[in-house]
Image (tube, coloured by chain):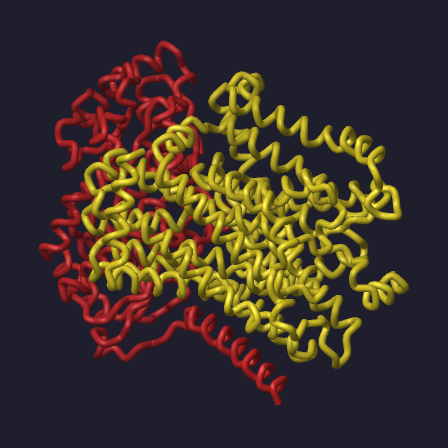
Amino acid sequence: MTEALQGLADGFAAAISPTNLFWAFFGVVAGTLVGVLPGLGTPATIAILPPLSVNLPPAAGLIMMAGIYYGSKYGGSTTSILLNIPGEDASVVTALDGYQMAKEGRAGQALGIAAIGSFIAGTIGLLGLTFFAPVVADLAIVFGPPEYAGLMILGLSLIILLAGTSKLKALIAGVFGFLLSTVGLDLFTGAVRFTFGRIELANGVEFVALSIGLFAIGEVMINSEEQSGHQLFRVPRKMRELFPTKQDMKQSSWAIGQGSIVGFFIGALPGAGSTVASFISYTLAKRFSKHPERFGKGAIEGVAAPEAANNSATAGAFIPLLTLGIPGSASTAIMLGALFLYGLQPGPLFFTENPDVVWPIIASMYIGNVLLVMLNLPLVPVFASILRIPYYILSPGIIVISIVGVFSINSSMFDVWLLVLFGLLGYVMRKTGFPAAPLVLAFVLGPLFEQAVRRSLVLSQGDLSIFVTRPWAVVFLVCTALLTLGPTVTGVIKHKGPPETPEPSEEKEGEQSVDAPESKTEASISGKRQGRV
Amino acid sequence: MFRTRKIRSALILVALSVLVSACGFDSGGSGGGSESDFESTSVEFLVHTGPGGGSDIFARDLIEIMRQEEVISENWPVRNEEAGEGAGAMSYLAGQGDATDTISAMTTTWLTTPLTIEGAEITIDELTPIAGLIVEPEVMAVAADSPYKSLSDFVDAAKEAPGELVQAGGSTTEVGALNGASIAAEAGTDWQFLSFEEVGQRIAALLNGDADMMFGSASDFAAQVDAGKLKIIAAISPEPSPIFPDAPTAADEGFETTLVPQVRGIMGPPDIPEEALEYYQGVFERALETDGWKEYAERNGLVTELRLGDKWGDFLSQQNEVVKEALKGADL
């Protein structure tokens, strides 16, 4: 502990040198841009930087790369909230409630809570990285296939919590997402599944095309049906109305705290990642909310939780990288490659042998977090004012950004056609009341689940008892049981309590919808829409 | 007035966003590039993995070394064609015809993919071999407290309990998997193969005892070996690993099976003009003689084996036969 404090103090002394400060600043600004622009992926951006960073001292180079990495998680929320375009994989969940908030004229609050939540969670994650890295690293190693399987079962069972008007429709959407996730090369056998001979599908369906299609394009199509010249959303003029209120902060505090911890641990697991963290944190926030019915309709906790989780996940992701030399994601793999290029070798001895590199990097992340929140909060009104643009100008813009973003990932027209296809699907799902969130969640968790189960069965040679004989796997299965069977129990309790709304809570619960067309808050639009459906 | 200004600034913001993401575009075309000035044109360097993958990191390191050593003056942008374990990159390269400004890094994966992946139609002999650069001797790692002190120890244990021991690795057609299957076949036994997409997870499986051993590149294990968590007990290649010279090779242990080597080299489009071919061969020949390269190779345990043009092509055809045999043995 004292060792860590000493190291951190030395790290700060190094990190505030003008060079290091400059590169931290450069990194977080570039990261914010990467996050805002869909399609410009974090790994791809970090990968082109070693030529620049090699001319810098190792600490400065890594400070810049790390800045891009966690900066992109900050930026990713912006387009999710404003335009329903997930700017970054881990921001898909943020769109669920963030965009609904924007529709209600609360874009400023959503952007504000995303920045504040990201800052708090990022800092909590960094405290974890500073003081508990070795402990968490040991835990990450213990996590084998059966433990991952347990975690994924927990995640997948939460699909039911993302249900809209109908649990059945949520399940159908989830199963469809799972099916989509099986497309592509099977790692275990080398077989190619459901690609119809298209080599473009060999690596599976492009996630960005799927998420942007379902969310952004589907939404534009629905809105274009209704909208003429005027702007779609109300945007408050007063500065004060553009920032989260005390009430908002209070409401989000638990979500931020929970997201910070969940994100940190999931981020530290090699192979899980911040997208998984944000999903699990969101569903937990909903599960334990007193008003789960508000989720999917602009609940501020629904923005705070995933944003907190994906930021503390980045701090967590540095643990296996720095303490074990094991990268858990493409971005950290590139940073490992950069360290190699400097002649450094992250691993169990890295902290003791290269404190002059490790601690300035960690210290710079604290500073970077402060820079990010200072950078992002003043931009909130600027970004929010984008929504003042009349929709007939905004919607083609959204389509252009989406197409350019999706194309730029693999320079593939095929992906653009996928985008179109998923846009149509998103439209039909909105029309028919199928929620998009379960589909996306299953798509993200499906392959992790499948692989973890198959690996477990390789280890046990087909014996299913492996899932109940390893402690952590059991912990997750018990949690799954509690969380899924729980609603019936708590539902009864809630029923007895004083009803918060005129309607009985259960009925109200039946109405909650994630991305379903019948958003009550949009009275005028949904009124028309309901008439038509 | 205030309002229009706001709108304008917002519009500019959107426009800027579009512009910046447009910069992320790779111009997909097969630019001809005038043949006389290869040195001043920027070369598109194709790799078959995503950013952060093995080939991607190798390609970027190589370009960086060549730039620092002034073998090339321009930065060569890397293009990631990730689809289908090399199949996408190979068909992209095949589609370049006689272009002079696109070349690609290749690995042994380019030999296995056309044989194993459905829809992978391009084979290595449809492309132009430019240069073979390195052979990366794979080593066998076990946990530090493992009962196995040598490859033979492990194989003997596998004979006692066929199908129970576990080897960690990547896809079932990667070099480590093929060599594991060949060694098992020679010994008349078999063991499980546990596939992980990421190297980090494979090492974690070794550290937590889920897997009993792993074949991989020496640099992947070095940090753990230094920390006393893993030990290297064999070199799964004809020659010992430069990083772990004391680990006996499979042949030293009495195994006769022909091992598939992990090779890295450079391929060009099918009809790349002769001058361009010679230019690139000159570049890589010079690159491999620089101090920067030698230091890099030593640190990463790479064995430099420069093969140019036909020599490289012959080597590939010969390796192709080895891979075919190994795949047959592995029942794939």
Q: From where the camera sits, is residue A85 visible?
A: no
Q: Nearer the viewer, residue A475 or A301?
A: A301
Q: Residue furthest bottom?
A: B1
Q: Nearer the viewer, residue B184 or B273?
A: B184
Which x, y percent locates residue B279?
19, 68
Relative to A404, A131 lies left or right: left
Relative to B140, B324 lies left or right: right
Q: Is residue A69 above or below residue B72?
A: above
Q: Is residue A213 above or below residue B298?
A: below
What chain is the yellow one? A
Q: Nearer the viewer, residue A436 or A241?
A: A241
Q: Residue at x 43, y 58 (%)?
A: A71
- In the rendered image, which quarter contains the N terminus of chain A? top left
State which quadrant residue B79 falls in: bottom left
Q: Residue furthest top?
A: B160
Which x, y percent locates residue A452?
52, 32
Relative to A458, B54 lies left or right: left
State which quadrant residue A350 falls in: top left
Q: Residue at x 87, y 61 (%)?
A: A530
Which x, y percent locates residue A514?
72, 51
Q: Residue furthest right?
A: A531
The colour with which the image depicts chain B is red
Q: Residue at x 35, y 63 (%)?
A: A25
Q: Is residue B144 above or below residue B173?
A: above
Relative to A200, B127 lies left or right: left
Which x, y percent locates residue B153?
26, 15
Q: Nearer the viewer, residue A225 or B173?
A: A225
Q: Residue at x 71, y 52 (%)?
A: A296
- In the rendered image, which quarter contains the C terminus of chain A? bottom right
Q: Residue furthest front?
A: A246
Q: From where the camera sits, is residue A136 visible?
A: yes
